[in-house]
């Protein structure tokens, strides 16, 4: 097995296939890595209910096998969870998780050689609070009755406890202001090729639909992880057919196009009154600092420029905290949306940060979190 | 004259003077400012010079702070590229400035309010002209939108 190869695979364990989505390949691969001592710990989501789950770092194989499976309404981010812990760890990660982990790696907070990143295809995640509201308003069902959810052919399907399925197209939901988080709509990293191994159900054809996972190996670490799972008897793989590979490429292309379209729609240039716009959006800020705490590209710690030079007593027209954050995120922002999610006064922070990051990253041709390229900020050429 | 009367007379005679913060490096542009004085080149009294040892020391934070405290324009000056007293300090300035420029512009502050210039110790006339040009540009633009209330 080597870099660039593609497979279709599934778990050999009946129980895992039933619990996890798409054949349970990812769960089995993580469990095998743990059992064969390839890693010391694995990060999984522990389910509380359909809308809530907590990420845990565990060394117990059974806990991995009993983990949640995929939940679209839990937009957790793993990069800060494993940062500064010096763990030998394997973890599942969406595109933005992978980017966060790589950025932490650049800042020496995570040792990437000891981190096995299982990338997951991601079309977007939903905010749990918005999801609950959406269920009541759009689907007319009680959030407590929901038993499972799924995204299929552009439709978001909720299954209730009495076995009925309720489906509404995502376009319709997003028109009404529900659906995916805003940062997911304009995200263009749908297949995480920056991870060690990219997994997802796109490209699975024929009888295997819903029962298998399509994997693409992106690095030697990824090959090692899959080979280990096969040797341990946890996973079975076969070669994908050409039709599947073409289909995966097509879905990827369509989703990325859609992301670009959303990007154009959300980031309409503001010709005049930009300062008033930013001041208005930030006027309710309560200085809690939550956006910095969750930010997966920030590794300054508690004592940092943005907090030390900022005082609540300042009578400035704009807070120094936000100005420094704007500057620092101009080259680092990966657009994961965590800051908007945690903001207690609902400031659309990701949108504000992206306003600065989009032109800078475009101009410098630098995409954070995609590879190990150093930020241009640190590139001083002596012989220019 | 009371403060109120002063303000009215200032608007009547259009005597508003912009407040410009100029960061100068010790070895080149501060020397440039010096030789502007020694050569008796006329320049407006709008610039407040802050001397730093190297333009590479100028943190974007200093520029933000100047704006927030009421500066109408901030000038970042240093040695010509290749002439830095500390080998590559002004290369670092250049990179930092690229980010800073983008952020300040995106924030909605006019381009003229933040300017970069390389001035050597012998270019007194260039320094004086630079200050004169910037002052004229800022006079046209008016006070900075980030100026706190109650600050002239």
Image (cartoon, rainbow, N blue to C red):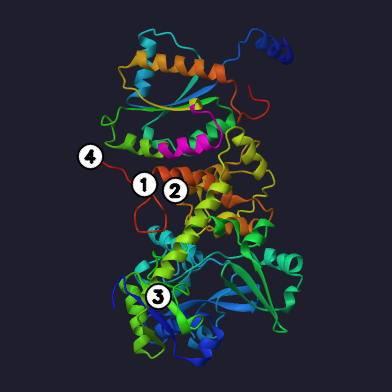
Report, in whole angstroms, how far the alpha carbon at label 1 lies from the one at label 3: 33 Å
Cα–Cα gap, marks 1 and 2? 8 Å
Cα distance, mark 3 to mark 4?
44 Å
Residue A14 point in image, percent of width and height: 50, 92
Frontmost residue, A252 versus B4 = A252
Residues drawn in magenta: B98-111
Same chain assignment for discs 3 and 2? yes
* Element under disc 1: helix
Residue in view at x 38 percent, y 32 percent: B55
Q: CA distance from mark 3 to mark 2?
A: 31 Å
Label ID, residue A383: 4
* Label 1 Cα crowd, 10 Å radius (few <14 / some 14-19 / many 20+): some
Relative placement, left or right, of A308 versus A246 is: right
Location of mark 2 (residue): A331
Residue carrying label 3? A215
Q: Chain of mark 1?
A: A
- Residue B131 sits above or below residue B107 on the image: above
Q: Earlier in the sequence, mark 1 or mark 2?
A: 2
Mark 2, Cα crowd under 10 Å, few <14 / some 14-19 / many 20+, is: many
- Of all chains, the one bearing label 3 is A
Placement of the C terminus of chain A among the 4 image quadrants:
top left
């Amino acid at each position: 097995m080597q870099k660039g190869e593609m497979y279709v695979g599934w778990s050999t364990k009946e129980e895992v296939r039933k619990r996890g989505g798409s054949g349970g390949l990812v769960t089995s691969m993580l469990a095998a890595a743990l059992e064969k001592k390839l890693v010391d710990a694995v990060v999984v989501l522990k389910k509380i209910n359909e809308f809530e789950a907590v990420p845990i770092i565990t060394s117990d194989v059974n806990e991995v096998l009993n983990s949640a499976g995929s939940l679209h309404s839990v937009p957790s981010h793993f990069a800060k969870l494993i940062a500064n812990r010096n763990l030998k760890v394997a973890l599942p990660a969406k595109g933005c998780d992978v980017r966060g982990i790589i950025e932490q790696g650049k800042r020496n907070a995570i040792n990437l050689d000891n981190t096995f990143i299982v990338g997951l295809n991601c079309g977007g995640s939903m905010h749990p609070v918005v999801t609950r509201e959406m269920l009541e308003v759009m689907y007319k069902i009680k959030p407590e009755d929901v038993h499972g959810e799924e995204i299929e052919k552009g439709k978001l399907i909720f299954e209730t406890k009495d076995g009925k399925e309720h489906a509404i197209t995502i376009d319709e939901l997003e028109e009404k202001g529900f659906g995916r988080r805003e940062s997911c709509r304009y995200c263009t990293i749908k297949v995480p090729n920056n991870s060690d191994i990219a997994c997802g159900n796109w490209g699975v054809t024929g009888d295997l639909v819903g029962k298998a996972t399509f994997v693409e190996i992106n690095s030697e670490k990824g090959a090692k992880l899959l080979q280990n799972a096969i040797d341990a008897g946890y996973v079975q793989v076969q070669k994908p057919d050409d039709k599947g590979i073409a289909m995966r490429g097509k879905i990827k292309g369509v989703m990325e196009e859609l992301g670009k379209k959303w990007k154009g729609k959300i980031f309409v240039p503001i010709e005049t009154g930009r300062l008033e716009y930013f001041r208005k959006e930030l006027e309710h800020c309560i200085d809690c600092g939550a956006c910095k705490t969750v930010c997966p590209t920030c590794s300054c710690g508690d004592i940092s420029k943005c907090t030390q030079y900022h005082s609540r007593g300042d009578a400035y027209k704009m807070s120094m905290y936000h100005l420094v954050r704007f500057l620092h995120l101009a080259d680092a922002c990966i657009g994961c949306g965590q800051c908007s999610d945690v903001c207690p006064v609902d400031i659309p922070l990701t949108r504000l940060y992206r306003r600065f990051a989009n032109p800078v990253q475009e101009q410098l041709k630098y995409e954070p979190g995609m590879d190990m390229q150093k930020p241009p900020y640190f590139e001083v050429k002596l012989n220019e | 004259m009371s403060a109120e009367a002063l303000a009215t007379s200032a608007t009547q005679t259009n005597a508003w003077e912009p407040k410009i913060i100029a960061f100068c490096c010790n070895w080149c542009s501060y020397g440039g400012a010096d030789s502007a004085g020694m050569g008796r080149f006329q320049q407006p009294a709008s610039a407040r010079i802050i001397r730093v040892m190297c333009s590479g020391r100028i943190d974007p934070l200093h520029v933000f702070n100047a704006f927030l405290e009421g500066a109408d324009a901030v000038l970042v000056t240093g040695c010509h590229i290749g002439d830095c007293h500390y080998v590559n300090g002004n290369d670092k300035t250049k990179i930092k400035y690229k980010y800073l420029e983008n952020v300040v512009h995106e924030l909605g502050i006019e381009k003229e309010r933040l300017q970069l210039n390389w001035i050597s110790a012998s270019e007194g006339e260039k320094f004086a002209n630079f200050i004169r040009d910037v002052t004229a540009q800022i006079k046209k633009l008016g006070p900075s939108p980030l100026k706190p209330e109650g600050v002239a």
